[in-house]
Amino acid sequence: MIQAAIAAGAGLIVFYLVVKALDLDLGYGFLSGPAGFNFSNQWLTNYDSNDSRLGAYGVGILNTVRLVAIGIVMTTVLGVLAGIARLSDNWLVSRVAMVYVETIRNTPLLIQIVIWYTVVLLQLPRIAEAINVFDVFYLSNRALALPYVSTGGNFGPWLIIVVVGAVAAIVLRSWLRRREERAGGTQHATAWALALFAVVSVVTFFLTGTPLEPDTPSLEISEVGLLSIIGGLQVSPEFAAVLLGLVIYTGAFIAEIVRSGIQALPRGQDEAAAALGLSGYQRMTLIILPQALRVIIPPLTNQYLNLTKNSSLAVAIAYPEIIWVGKTMINNIGHAVPLFVLIFATYLSLSLAISVVMNTFNRRVQLAGR
C-alpha cells in the first residue's frame, strides 16, 4: 500500500516536470466559472447549470461513489452466492453457475452495459404505459420509481443522536463480550446492543418530531401536457444499466475467487464440521468462509479496484460520472491536461481509499504470527 502511494506520487512528480518543461497550463482557475450544463442524474445535490464547474465535478464524484458503493455490496453478494453454487452437489445449480461465470467473464463489459441499456431497459413501456404496482411502484423506460423517505428540519440532530447510539451499542457489546470471557456464561451481547440502538433510535425519532417522512412517487401531467413521475426514489435507466453491467461482470470474477478460496482449505475442515452435526449452512458460514477469507481478500480487493475503474465506462451511455463531466468540460472550455490530471488524482484517491479499508480488514482475518 505504501509502495503504491510512493510510486503514484513519483509518477505525478515526473508528469508535472514534463508539463512544466513543455510550458503547458495546469491552472485550475477555470473551475470557478459557471458550468453551463446540468445533470439528468444527481445524488445528494441540487446542482444548477449556473453553479461552478468545481461543483459540477463534485456531482460527478458523488455519482461515481454511489455507483461504486452500491456495486461493491451487490457484486460481493452475487459473487459469494455464485462461487458457492459452483461447488454445489446439485448438478443443475453448479452447471448454471458455471455457464454464468464462463459466459460473463469472457465477454467485454462495455458490450454488456450497452446491451442492458439498449436491449433491455430502453425497451420497457413508455411512461404513459408504465407498469404500476398499487400506485407505489412505477416502471418505465424513463425510470424505476420506488417509495422513499424525505428528511425534515430535525433530521440532522436525530442523525447525530443515532450515531451516538450506535457507538454506545458497540461499546456495550464489547463490554459484555469481555465479561463473557472473564465470567463465562452467555451475556447476549449482540441482542443487548441491538436493543439499545433500537430504543435510542425509535424514542428519539418521535421526540424530535419524526424527522423522516414517506415520499411516494406519483404520475402527474405538467402544464404543457407532459406526463412525468414526481417524488420517490427514481432509478434512471443509465444508472441501472451501468450498475447491472458492473455487478454481473465483476460478480463472475469474484465467484471464481470464492470457489478457489474454499477449495484451498483442507477437506478435513468440512468433514470435521459435518461430524459435529453442523448443517450445510452452518459449515459454510461458521467454518469454511471465515477461514477462506484469508485467501479470498487479496484478489477480492483487486476486483473492487477494477469495479471502481470500470465505472468510467458509464460515459458510453451518458451516465454523468467523473469521465462524463470531464469530457463535457473539455468540449466546452478546453483545459484537457489539468482536467485529465484531476481525473487521474480522483480515481487514484478512490482506489487508495478502498485499498486501505481492504488491507486493514485483511490484517484482521490473518492468523496471528503471519
Image (tube, grey):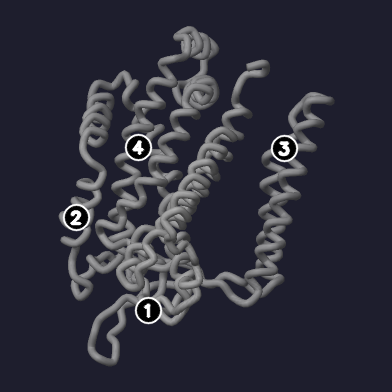
The x and y percentages for residue 321 are 38, 60
C-alpha span from label 4 to label 2: 20 Å
Q: Secondary structure at mark 3?
A: helix
Residue that carries the numbered disc 4 in the rendered image: 251
Residue 96 in sight here: yes
Are dots 1 and 3 in contact, CB under 8 Å? no
In the image shown, does 107 or 6 lie closer to the viewer? 6
Task: Residue 233: name its quadrant.
Answer: bottom left
- Crowding around mark 3 (Cα neighbors within 10 Å: few <14, some 14 to 19, many 20+) is many
Q: Earlier in the sequence, mark 1 or mark 4?
A: 1
In the image shown, does 185 or 334 lie closer to the viewer? 334
The x and y percentages for residue 101 are 27, 31
Q: Earlier in the sequence, mark 1 or mark 3?
A: 1
In the image shown, does 278 or 155 lie closer to the viewer? 155
Residue that carries the numbered disc 3 in the rendered image: 189
* In the rendered image, the vertical position of residue 118 relative to residue 173, given as above or below: below
C-alpha span from label 1 to label 4: 38 Å
Task: Please give left or right for residue 276 compared with residue 230 in the image.
Answer: right
Q: Secondary structure at mark 4?
A: helix
Q: Indicate the amino acid at tag 4.
A: Gly
C-alpha span from label 3 to label 4: 34 Å
- Crowding around mark 2 (Cα neighbors within 10 Å: few <14, some 14 to 19, many 20+) is few
Mark 1 or 4: in front is 1
- Crowding around mark 4 (Cα neighbors within 10 Å: few <14, some 14 to 19, many 20+) is many
Question: Which residue is rendered at x = 20% and y = 47% of the image?
Answer: 111
Question: Which residue is rendered at x = 54% and y = 12% of the image?
Answer: 276
The x and y percentages for residue 136 are 36, 68
Q: Indicate the amino acid at tag 2.
A: Val
Residue that carries the numbered disc 2 in the rendered image: 120
The mark found on residue 36 in the picture is 1
Q: Earlier in the sequence, mark 4 or mark 2?
A: 2
